[in-house]
Amino acid sequence: MAMASHDVTDTNVMGDINVTPMVDVMLVLLIIFMVVTPAIAAGFQAKLPEGAHLKARPEKDDRTVIGIDRYGAYYLNKKTIPGCRAKDVATPAGVASCDAILRNMLTQEFQKHPQDKVLFVKADQTLKYGTILHAMDLARQSGARVLAAVTEQKPGTKPDETVQE
């Protein structure tokens, strides 16, 4: 019985790594991160004041929320209000223009749900108190009947379960 010999130089095996699939995967990941990163950074971002023994309440999408970031820019339901960005409210004329825009947008928002004229205020903890009072005054002029300040639970404390609604 004769054995068939096999010559090693005749094989079709390559010793190099095929990088094309790896490059394809990396490009797809790059595109995903390029699309997702601006969406994460967009919207209202502020460090809210902290409180102890707060009652946990889930956020509802149908509520009207006004936000003020640490630069003084205004947001309505996590969307930037055009004409009320930080650079727009740097001058007295810009503040007056922003006030008119904000009053109009809040009035329209409260007309969408006239039975619920509650406004939740999310403001950065480093803002001056007068800025928050000014926003609350504009909300009252726009038809808000109840104003609620939103805070975060202080680290190391527990929410209060005894608070009745």
Image: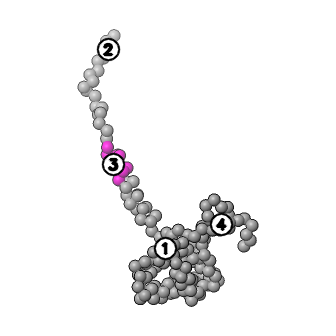
From the image, state whether disc 3 or disc 1 is nearer to you.
1
Is 52 rendered above or below residue 75? above
In the picture, the disc for residue 52 is 4
Check disc 4 and report its element: helix, strand or loop: loop
Q: Is residue 56 left or right of residue 67?
A: right
Q: CA distance from mark 2 to mark 4?
A: 85 Å
Q: CA distance from mark 3 to mark 4?
A: 51 Å
Check disc 1 and report its element: helix, strand or loop: loop
Residue range (magenta):
19-27
Query: In terms of image quadrants, where is residue 2?
Result: top left
Amino acid beneath label 3: Val
Q: Which residue is mark 1?
A: 69
Residue 51 seen from this side: yes
- The front one of 74 and 40 is 74
Q: CA distance from mark 3 to mark 1?
A: 40 Å
Is 145 rendered above or below residue 52? below
The local crowd at label 2, few if under 14, some if 14 to 19, many if 20 or more residues have their Cα within 10 Å, is few
Q: Earlier in the sequence, mark 1 or mark 2?
A: 2
Residue 21 magenta: yes
Q: Earlier in the sequence, mark 3 or mark 1?
A: 3
Amino acid beneath label 1: Asp
Q: Which residue is mark 3?
A: 23
Q: Which residue is mark 2?
A: 3
Q: Earlier in the sequence, mark 2 or mark 4?
A: 2
Is 10 rendered above or below residue 22? above
Q: CA distance from mark 3 to mark 2?
A: 44 Å
Horizontal and vertical percent position of residue 49: 57, 70
Check disc 2 and report its element: helix, strand or loop: loop
Horizontal and vertical percent position of residue 13: 30, 32
Task: Tell me which residue sits at (56%, 83%) in the image.
Answer: 133
Q: Earlier in the sequence, mark 3 or mark 4?
A: 3
Q: Quadrant of the C terminus?
A: bottom right
